[in-house]
Amino acid sequence: MIKVGVVGVGQFGQNHARILQNSDFCDFVGFYDKNPGRVQEIARKTQAHSFPSFAALIEQCEALIIVVTTVSHFELAKAALKKGIHVFIEKPIASNLKEAVELQELAEKNNLKLQVGHIERFNPIVLEMEDKIKDPLFIECHRIGPFTARGTDVPVVLELMIHDIDLILAFIKSKVKHISASGAGVLTRSIDIANARIEFEDGAVANVTASRISLKRSRKLRIFQKDGYFSMDFQAKKVRHIKRSKNLYKVLPKLLAGNYEGIETENVVDINEVDASDRSKDALTLELESFIQAIEANINPVVDGKAGIRALEVALEIVNKIQNK
């Protein structure tokens, strides 16, 4: 089995360590974190081996999971790739495009796998519906939550919105034509709330909102296409697929004549609801499994370095539009 290590076992990194420690799809060799107190806590929780340094960790790894602050992504990923180690790096791939491109080129040069942690690609409701999503015309995303200190080293665009940017770019195959954006820093000196309109060359449009200063937590996305639309609730792990009913054409003459008497919702639309909340594997487990499978089968990761670069490029343009208003 592939020998895997984790660098960074903070609030999210500890979840990686826990899943890998209990997994049957890899050999988890252990973790490193620069915080000694954190090391002791996670070693006690997971019973996993802790390494005294990053250098010691990568001596024992064939694959590395990087879950640290964004500014440290490049340095750690570069060191691992240079040593011939496959890398999974949490989103965003890097702080800037220059670093991101260099990591991708290094992975390609050394024939290594580079996967970026855009976890929503592995959300059960996305996996359930992805083959039904065809040529979206309009996408609307809302990703909001209460303020926490975690993630405030970057704008909310790079912390939260980038999840939806990645999904949008996966669903809409056309090139980005134009971006307009607005936002503000409210509790920090960075951008805490943002909205962007992304227009594509094929005419599709995406409207994206992200906030880390809301009173409640919500993760919702709606996709509209010619035959219907999808309404996804990432928190509840539920999705509704609303499409034209087969009975629509029977009542169409009445509708066109302005006669709505006796016409019920079921005469116009079919609603298919999928509840994926009871799935045995969560998105993070599926994501990590996919990374290991890509290494073992020598195939391209689902979310490779190029996908990470595309998402970062759009996110940075949104940040630039907001900061230069």
Image: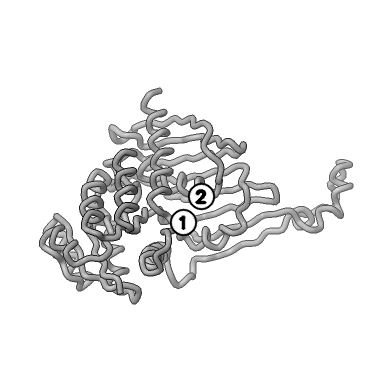
Horizontally, residue 174 falls left or right of residue 245, namely left
> Spatial distance from mark 1 to mark 2, Cα to Cα?
9 Å
Callout 1, which amino acid?
Arg
Callout 2, which amino acid?
Ala
Horizontally, residue 234 falls left or right of residue 133, namely left
Q: Percent from the top left, x then y, of residue 189? A: 28, 32
* Residue at 40% from the left image edge and 38% from the top image edge: 313
Q: Percent from the top left, x then y, of residue 92? A: 34, 46
Whether residue 215 can be seen here: no
Q: Quadrant of residue 85?
A: bottom left
Q: Nearer the viewer, residue 206 or 29?
A: 29
- Residue receiving disc 2: 170
- Residue receiving disc 1: 121
Residue 70 lies, with reference to residue 178, above or below; the image says: below
Q: Earlier in the sequence, mark 1 or mark 2?
A: 1
Q: Nearer the viewer, residue 195 or 148?
A: 195
Q: Do the residues bearing badges 1 and 2 touch, measured as CB atoms within 8 Å?
A: yes
Horizontally, residue 222 falls left or right of residue 165, namely right
Whether residue 208 can be seen here: yes
